[in-house]
Image: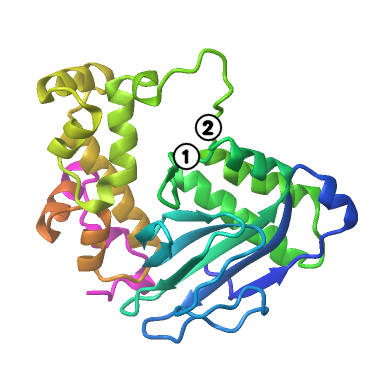
Amino acid sequence: MRNPESFCHVLPVPQRAFHAPLYVTNVGIEHIGPGQVYPELKPAVYFFSWEEGRTLPEFCLALCMEGSGNLETKKGRQTLHSGEAFLFRPGEWHRHRPAKAEGWTLCWLGFNGDLPHRWMNEDAFAMNGNKPLIEFRELFIQQFERMLFTTHRAPTRNSEELAWQAIGLLSHFIIDRHAESPIPEHRSKDVVSRAVEFIWNHTHTGLSVSDVVQHVGCSRRTLETRFKLSMEKTVLDEILTCCTERALHLLKSTNLPIKQIVLRSGFQSREQMRLVFHKLLGKAPRDFRPASKKASP
């Protein structure tokens, strides 16, 4: 379900759903073009102004599928990029809006129930500010698209299927803090696993090998040696692989100019992206753009 029309479905919640571990309250998607007025009119409970912000009576999980924007809570501000998600808790003041220069495509899920409240009380959400730390981002996006399709197909039906799909989305960033013999996070994974996780969550910021070394807390020589033994490649190779995967996704699914894709995927320059593509894929970046999008400069 690529690029569906904008919609906001507020789902009926039957009495029996209030006793379920989790139930869905609303699902939607919006396409906001560059310079377009935001926010658009929605059901009154979800409309807000940037000046006043808002609070919601339920949890809200949102995914930026294209474009970028800003989100803010009382704890601070964050920039949202394509492929990133954020989570607001019930009663948490917040506001968000797309970047004027490029707009965004944003989809969201509203949900509630005893289960997410328990996760919240146990501090089980793996977060960086309000951003969920998602390891398998492509799978997460596919699951979100499936939920959009399920809802749009039957917007007046709030099914158990929908609740299970929501739990599947949330499972990407839930930490079990009641597991036996809990081990501190910084010790539970070896340096290679932590390095790979850090790379795939931060490459779009223009990551360097030194940044990875600093994050995992060991010497560069130690990291490179262990990385080579475990991955059969260097840390820089993994960074460039991640950059390439991000760029491929943007080339195939957006109309963004090449220069914007260079920045968002983490490459240092257009020439670097071209050289890496030829080395890893044997083709130029433009060769992966659908015919209808090859005119983008």
Q: Position of residue 81 (x, y in %)?
A: 36, 60
Frontmost residue, 269 versus 58: 58
In space, the residues marked 1 and 2 are separated at their CA atoms by 6 Å
**Residue at the image point whose x is 55% and y is 64% from the top:** 107
The residue most toward the top is: 181
Quadrant (top left, top right, bottom left, bottom right) of the C terminus: bottom left
Frontmost residue, 208 versus 278: 208
Residue, disc 1: 126
> How many marks are shown on the rendered structure?
2
Frontmost residue, 182 versus 30: 182
**Residue at the image point whose x is 49% and y is 58% from the top:** 63
Q: Is residue 89 magenta?
A: no
Q: Position of residue 50 (x, y in %)?
A: 45, 78
Q: Secondary structure at mark 1?
A: loop
Please give the range of residues in magenta.
277-297
Residue, disc 2: 175
Query: For the residue carrying disc 1, how many other residues have a C-alpha within 10 Å: few (<14), some (14-19), or many (20+)?
Result: some
**Residue at the image point whose x is 62% and y is 73% from the top:** 46
Q: Position of residue 207 (x, y in %)?
A: 19, 45
Q: Which mark is residue 60?
A: none
Evaluate if marks 1 and 2 touch, with contact meaning CB atoms under 8 Å apart.
yes
Query: Relative to residue 98, is residue 294 drawn left or right?
Result: left
- Kindly indicate the quadrant of the structure image that contains residue 157: bottom right
Badge 1 or badge 2: first in the primary sequence: 1
Residue 75 visible here? yes
Above-or-below relation of 81 to 187:
below
Q: Secondary structure at mark 2?
A: loop
Name the amino acid type tagged 2. Answer: Ile
Q: Position of residue 248 (x, y in %)?
A: 32, 54
Q: How is the image coloured?
A: rainbow
**Residue at the image point whose x is 32% and y is 51% from the top:** 246
